[in-house]
Image (tube, helix red, strand yellow):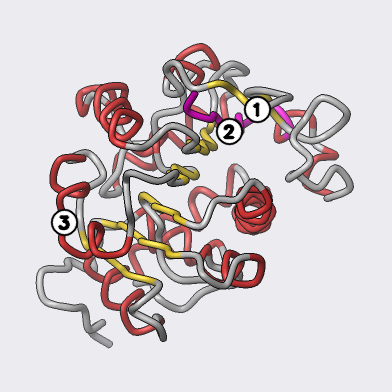
Amino acid sequence: MTEQAPQGVDPHIPNAARMYDYFLGGKDNFKADRELGDMVLSVMPEVRDGTRENRALIGRLVRYLCEQGITQFLDLGSGLPAQENVHEVAHRWAPEARVVYVDNDPVVAVHGRAMLADPSRVAMVQGDVRRPEEILSDPEVRGLLDFDRPVAVLMMFILHLIPEEDHPQDFVAAYRDAVAPGSYLAISHVTNDVATERTAKVTEFYRKANAAFTPRPGGEIGAFFGDFELIPPGLVTGPGPHGWPFIDPDHPLFADEEMTRMAYVGIGRKP
């Protein structure tokens, strides 16, 4: 049976956002996404639990930011709607919060807009996070977010899908420069500090998708925060006494030491 796709979407090219949806158990994906997703799971079955734990991580992180008084969120590379979306968590703790999702995938944009019930507080913008000047000048973004007041910029598991030739350090710096003092930058990013054969295979698999898989060493990930002050415990991997409290230390996923050390999480605050 031929799969129907929105205009401009090639269902035969695996898409990182739709693969993520597949790992979460969603239905907004195509055969090509599932096939490549299964290849990834064949060498790293923990990815399915990892994506679900990442969703929980985002929810805990948003709650923390609301507790710090943040009521504006810019979620870059948001992906397809799932359970416990940023605006749902934010409105639970700060009903006045405003959230803008940004993703370059038209399927994500269509589903995101269909999901939104309150355009006065939430918007879905189709745009490329690598072009901060376009995102930051977008009328919907400017209509909801006041950049003279603190904003939380979320880059959760998106930067490792952007290769070096796209100059991620430069465009992340543009977002840092655009926000007011007291703003936050949250990043989660797969690392290659502990290089494994499985990581190399996943990197190779993603060459078939629309986004390159680019794990980075901790030093490069830390550089994304620029002069922002890292909130203790800083840029860390995994749960435990020195890890972020947003990560569930009792999750079976982290019984595997390799998975515990696979990604960094950090939050920085603009002085």
Q: Which residue is mark 2?
A: 267
Foreground residue among 118 and 76: 118
> Which of the image's four quarters has the N terminus?
bottom left
Q: CA distance from mark 2 to mark 1?
A: 6 Å
Earlier along the polypeptide chain: callout 2 or callout 3? Answer: 3
Under mark 2, the amino acid is: Ile
Residue type (three-letter) at the residue carrying disc 1:
Ile
What's drawn in magenta, residue-wise?
Answer: 260-271
Give above or below for 95 relative to 239.
below
Q: What secondary structure is found at the residue carrying circle 2? A: strand
Question: Which residue lies under the disc numbered 3?
Answer: 138
- Which residue appears at 54% of the width and 37% of the height? 188
Q: Is residue 82 left or right of residue 263?
A: left
Q: Is residue 186 above or below residue 52?
A: above
In this view, the residue in front, 188 or 134, is: 134
**Residue occupied by mark 1:** 231
Is residue 250 found left or right of 82 in the rendered image?
right
